[in-house]
């Protein structure tokens, strides 16, 4: 199963981004420290990254899977290039990749 369920955006203030969406639309906000906030809305979670070392250069769509290793094999077999090796984050593990057209995405799974 592969399903887009997360989009991460760069932000100068993760807290301010979260507060905006909470006030504007009533969406649920979960802060993960000073540099990261999740916003849950309409079946999709939006993440706001304020740490310059971790910040994506553009919105980062994230694909959910049940098998991270199989997803990596599929990405590479289809011509994608892994740009960030698998790493842990609150709730699971993920890796980043670039598709042949140049866009960077990520694949994640809950803790295995």
Image (spheres, grey):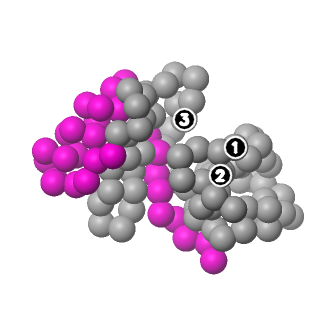
Question: Considering depth in this image, is 81 or 49 the residue closer to the camera?
Answer: 49
Disc 1 to disc 3, how far (Cα)?
A: 15 Å
- Residue at image location 69% in from the left, 49% down from the top: 95
Residue 102 appears in view: no
Q: Is residue 72 magenta?
A: no
In the image, residue 31 above or below residue 63: above
Q: Residue at x 49, y 25 (%)?
A: 51
Horizontal arrangement in the rendering, residue 77 relative to residue 16 (left or right): right
Query: Which quarter of the picture shows residue 3?
Result: bottom right
SS for callout 2: strand
Q: Nearer the viewer, mark 1 or mark 3?
A: 1
Question: Residue lying farthest bottom?
Answer: 1
Q: Position of residue 59 (x, y in %)?
A: 48, 43
Alpha carbons under labels 2 and 3: distance apart: 17 Å
Q: Are marks 1 and 2 in contact (CB under 8 Å)?
A: yes
The quarter of the picture where residue 14 lies is top left
Residue 63 vs residue 80: left or right? Answer: left
Residue at label 1? 87
Helix, strand or loop for disc 3: loop
Residue hosting label 2: 93
Question: In the rendered image, which residue does mark 3 sit on?
Answer: 56
Of mark 1 and mark 3, the one earlier in the sequence is 3
Range shown magenta: 1-30
Observer able to see residue 49: yes
């Amino acid at each position: 199963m592969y399903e887009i369920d997360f989009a991460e955006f760069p932000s100068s203030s993760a807290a301010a981004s979260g507060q905006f969406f909470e006030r504007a639309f009533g969406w649920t906000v979960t802060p993960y420290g000073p540099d990261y906030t999740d916003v849950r809305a309409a079946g999709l979670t939006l993440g706001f990254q304020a740490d310059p070392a971790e910040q994506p250069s553009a919105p980062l769509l994230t694909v959910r899977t049940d098998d991270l290793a199989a997803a990596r094999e599929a990405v590479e077999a289809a011509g994608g290039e892994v740009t960030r090796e698998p790493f842990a984050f609150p709730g699971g593990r993920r890796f980043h990749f670039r598709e042949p057209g140049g866009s960077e995405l990520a694949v994640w799974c809950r803790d295995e």
